[in-house]
């Protein structure tokens, strides 16, 4: 049922029209009345209006002015003007107000009935159109994630990116990744693959990822059948430019990949601390110009993540460039015992520290070597060896410093530099704390 508001400053006209509409069984209308524009506006503030039949000439505020106020509250309200005058200026202004009709009062009731009937038909059609559009929108909103999942799945199986994105099946999708520009993917895998709450935890990881992904990286995500998360990502050119190296596109991409690992570290830390979810990530290379490698990169990265999980190693972050540095037996975890893998990882950590005493032996640098989350690296080392990693690093620095003092004629400032201290005073403080005497006293005593 539509609501009709009749407005005229002449009560006899308003009341007469009300009676005629109520007596006409062709209409099913809720008919209201007002004797001024102000009264009409008060009604408009209280209830929905579908059709307005209004006199044009009224004291204080005209019907033409009233329409602007009505349209503010009820923009779909149909407008029919009544007037006792046929001046062209009124007709022209009425048309500008997008009025449905302009009727002279002298024409009688039938043109008014006809205009209201036509207004009802227009409202019916508008309602049908809106319902069709909303249904289509609702269906598409339901279908879009399914279609995107399907599209990403086909990409990862090696189908042509250009062909898929031109497929009519996906043409309506708002797919934000452009295959002609630099792009990459991240694959995420829960470290506990037999968890009964896998679906909920995958959703939690997706939320954590969204929280930390900057607006400067476009994203399309998918949850694959095997419970694996995949994000197709495209950094804006302005972001990539911040990692530019002169004449070195590979270096630029490596710099950006390191930045992405920092983001994934945040996601891992949040998921683990807030919701108790441990997740590992693999990062592909730049797909621009080589989308045909997607399937191979995906299988390689997922293979590494699952092999590490099978060997009880968590919170991995590995990029495709380093995926090939895993032990050969990782290709078949059944051939590699957990103890062997632990020994390999600890050996990698210790070898890196020994080779880089004068350089970067931060948790981040060491974690990069063995593809662990830096926070997890420290816990893992303590769990496997019973020793804090920082204590191990300091013991190796001290051991190397003592060796250099005993077997070389290097000056103390040179020895300090070789074991990673920026200043001799800092080295002296460290050495005295560990041995109880200064480096010079130690050298003199020996």
Image (tube, rainbow, N blue to C red):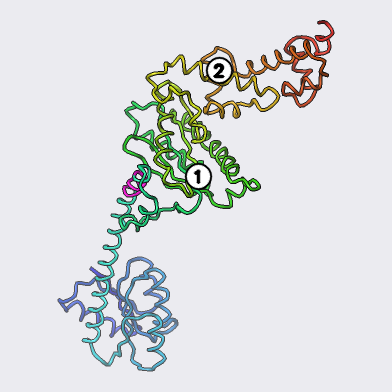
Which is nearer the N-term, disc 2 or disc 1?
A: 1
Q: Is residue 397 left or right of residue 86?
A: right
Magenta residues span 146-153
Quarter of the image for residue 193 reads top left
Q: Which of 207/254 is in front?
A: 254
Element on which disc 1 rests: loop
Q: Residue furthest top?
A: 445
Instruction: Find residue 135 and report its horizontal and vertical position in percent.
Output: 27, 58
Q: Is residue 415 left or right of residue 133?
A: right
Instruction: Find residue 175 and report its horizontal and vertical position in percent.
Output: 40, 53
Magenta: predominant secondary structure element?
Answer: helix
Tag 2 residue: 347
Element on which disc 2 rests: helix
Tag 1 residue: 286
What residue appears at the point 46 percent right and 35 percent down from the top-left corner?
282
Instruction: Find residue 236 and report its horizontal and vertical position in percent.
Output: 54, 51
Q: Disc 2 versus disc 1: distance between alpha carbons? A: 31 Å
Instruction: Find residue 21 and report its horizontal and vertical position in percent.
Output: 21, 79
Q: Which of 78/20 is in front?
A: 78
Q: Is residue 229 left or right of residue 412?
A: left
Residue 147 located within the stretch drawn in magenta: yes
> Do the numbered discs 2 and 1 sit on residues whose CB atoms are within 8 Å?
no
Quarter of the image for residue 37 reads bottom left
**Relative vertical location of residue 273 with respect to residue 428 in this rendering, above or below:** below
**Relative vertical location of residue 98 with respect to residue 417 in this rendering, above or below:** below
């Amino acid at each position: 049922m539509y609501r009709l508001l009749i407005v005229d400053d002449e009560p006899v006209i308003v009341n007469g029209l009300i009676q005629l509409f109520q007596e006409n069984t062709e209409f099913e209308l809720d008919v209201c009345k007002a004797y001024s524009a102000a009264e009409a506006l008060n009604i408009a503030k209280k209830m929905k209006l579908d059709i307005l039949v209004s006199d044009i000439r009224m004291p204080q505020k005209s019907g033409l002015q009233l329409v602007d106020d009505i349209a503010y509250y009820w923009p779909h309200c149909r407008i029919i003007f009544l007037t006792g005058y046929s001046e062209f200026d009124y007709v022209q202004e009425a048309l500008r107000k997008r009025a449905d009709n302009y009727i002279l009062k002298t024409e009688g009731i039938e043109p008014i009935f006809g205009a209201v009937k036509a207004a009802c038909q227009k409202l019916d059609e508008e309602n049908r159109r809106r319902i069709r559009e909303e249904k289509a929108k609702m269906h598409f909103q339901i279908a879009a994630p399914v279609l995107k999942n399907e599209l990403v799945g086909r990409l990862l199986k090696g189908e042509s990116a250009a062909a898929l994105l031109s497929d009519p099946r996906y043409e309506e999708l708002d797919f934000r990744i452009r295959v002609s520009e630099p792009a990459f993917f991240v694959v995420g895998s829960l470290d506990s693959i037999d968890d009964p709450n896998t679906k909920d935890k995958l959703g939690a990881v997706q939320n954590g990822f969204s929280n930390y992904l900057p607006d400067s990286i476009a994203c399309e995500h998918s949850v694959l059948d095997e419970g694996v998360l995949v994000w197709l990502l495209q950094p804006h050119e302005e972001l990539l430019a911040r990692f530019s190296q002169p004449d070195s596109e590979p270096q630029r991409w490596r710099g950006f990949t390191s930045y992405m690992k920092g983001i994934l570290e945040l996601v891992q830390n949040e998921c683990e601390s807030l919701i108790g979810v441990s997740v590992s990530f693999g990062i592909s290379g730049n797909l621009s110009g080589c989308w045909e490698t997607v399937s191979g990169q995906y299988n390689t990265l997922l293979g590494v993540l699952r092999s590490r999980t099978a060997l009880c190693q968590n919170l991995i972050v590995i990029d495709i460039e380093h995926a090939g540095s895993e032990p050969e037996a990782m290709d078949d975890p059944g051939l590699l015992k957990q103890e062997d893998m632990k020994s390999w990882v600890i050996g990698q950590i210790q070898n890196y520290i020994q080779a880089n005493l004068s350089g970067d032996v931060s948790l981040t640098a060491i974690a990069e070597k063995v593809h662990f989350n830096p926070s997890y690296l420290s816990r893992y080392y303590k769990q496997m060896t019973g020793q804090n990693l920082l204590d191990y690093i300091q013991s190796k620095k001290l051991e190397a410093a003592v060796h250099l003092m005993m077997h070389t004629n290097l000056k103390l400032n040179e020895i300090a530099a070789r074991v990673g201290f920026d200043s001799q005073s800092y080295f002296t403080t460290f050495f005295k704390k560990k041995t109880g005497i200064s480096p010079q006293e130690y050298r003199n005593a020996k």
